[in-house]
Image (cartoon, rainbow, N blue to C red):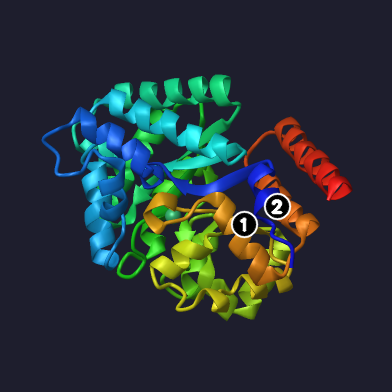
């Protein structure tokens, strides 16, 4: 079998499920830590590589929160956002919907207007410098409850930054039923935001049904357990409701026990529009290119098959039709040239 990694590395891509703080690579964390010497986070990238090797999920949460604690000022927010875009551009990501949890920052005392200005400034600078187009999904941290839902909705609707396109819900699913968030999603949808909650990552298919029926989901974050419910897969396929599949994340969080048992095959076989994503890439020791490699192996794809997966993400994005056509055209041109030369 040919090594698809060089092809994947150069392939123009779109990413739909990737978290802001969760994208902080050791390089970015080292820079942030250097600004805050009182933090316990190492500033040397080599020591950070060790710091980022997790012993278990609780350790992952500890490390994640220590990175959250490094983002204290609007300048930290700007630096993180711009540098995340740089890491994306290096992987030929042309467009990304970055999931941001503004509640985490405003609750820590960052001024809300300065926060919005920082992400917007980074978005415009990244597009000008790297050509990578960023859009935002503001998500409710489910574990923080309805207070966080109210605050996230207020921030999204009252301060609505230009790049904001969607409204999400993350955090644990066990003990955090989706239907309680319906009033907040209703308000966000009425204001023109797209609904993209996480569902079916760590709980069964009923959570995905709840996300569809109660939260008006237009795409599903993960949806891993949808594969257990053939009627649900058929429904997703018929309505063209995409799944944001993140294979390595599912392994890291034990949502799937073995990568070779990942249900992405069943999803594709049922005709569901599957997109490939990286979730919290440095934290899970991956990046988007690696996720495409994993998916290609699980699905037995060649270059054309991988290019089709990349086009699924473009189709499932909230980019305008001209933007979609532009990136899909880049994917086709790249793939045609590659196939002709190899
Ligand atoms: Zn996620």
Q: Left or right: 239 with respect to 195?
A: right
Instruction: Say above or below: 247 vs 316.
Output: below
Quick check: which quadrant has ligand 1?
A: bottom left
Q: Position of residue 179 (x, y in %)?
A: 41, 62
Task: Where is residue 124? Give x, y as percent.
Answer: 51, 21
Can residue 334 be seen at all in this image of the molecule? yes
Q: At 55% from the left edge and 79% from the top edge, which residue is drawn?
A: 261
Alpha-carbon neighbours of circle 2 within 10 Å: few (<14), some, or many (≥20)?
Answer: some
Q: Which residue is under mark 2?
A: 312
Residue marked by disc 1: 292
- Left or right of residue 179: residue 41: left
State the residue in front, 58 or 158: 58
Residue beneath the point at 65% across and 68% down: 297
- The one nearer the camera, 101 or 34, is 34
Q: Secondary structure at mark 1?
A: helix
Q: CA distance from mark 2 to mark 1?
A: 12 Å
Foreground: disc 2 or disc 1 = 1
Q: Is residue 108 left or right of residue 162?
A: left
């Amino acid at each position: 079998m040919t090594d698809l990694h060089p092809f994947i590395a150069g392939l123009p891509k779109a990413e739909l499920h990737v978290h802001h703080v969760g994208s902080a690579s050791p390089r970015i964390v080292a820079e942030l830590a250097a600004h805050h010497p009182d933090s316990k986070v190492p500033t040397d990238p080599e020591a950070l590589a060790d710091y980022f090797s997790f012993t278990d999920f609780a350790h992952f949460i500890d490390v994640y929160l220590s990175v959250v604690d490094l983002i204290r000022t609007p300048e930290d927010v700007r630096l993180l956002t711009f540098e995340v875009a740089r890491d994306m551009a290096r992987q030929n990501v042309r467009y990304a919907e970055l999931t941001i949890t503004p509640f985490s920052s405003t609750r820590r005392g960052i001024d809300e207007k300065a926060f919005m200005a920082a992400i917007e400034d980074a978005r415009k600078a990244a597009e000008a410098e790297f050509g990578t187009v960023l859009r935002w999904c503001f998500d409710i941290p489910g574990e923080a409850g309805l207070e966080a839902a109210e605050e996230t909705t207020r921030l999204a609707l009252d301060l609505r930054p230009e790049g904001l396109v969607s409204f999400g819900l993350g955090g644990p699913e066990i003990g955090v039923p989706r239907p309680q968030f319906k009033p907040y999603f209703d308000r966000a949808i009425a204001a023109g935001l797209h609904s993209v909650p996480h569902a079916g990552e760590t709980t069964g298919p009923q959570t995905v049904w709840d996300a569809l029926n109660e939260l008006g989901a237009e795409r599903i974050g993960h949806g891993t357990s949808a594969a257990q419910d053939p009627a649900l897969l058929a429904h997703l396929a018929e309505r063209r409701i995409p799944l944001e599949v993140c294979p390595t994340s599912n392994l890291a969080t034990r949502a799937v026990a073995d990568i070779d048992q990942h249900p992405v095959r069943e999803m594709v076989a049922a005709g569901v529009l599957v997109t490939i994503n990286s979730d919290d890439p440095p934290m899970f020791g991956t990046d988007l290119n690696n996720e495409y490699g994993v998916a290609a192996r699980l699905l037995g794809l060649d270059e054309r098959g991988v290019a089709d997966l990349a086009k699924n993400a473009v189709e499932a994005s909230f980019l305008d039709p001209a933007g979609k056509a532009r990136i899909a055209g880049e994917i086709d041109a790249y793939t045609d040239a590659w196939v002709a030369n190899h």
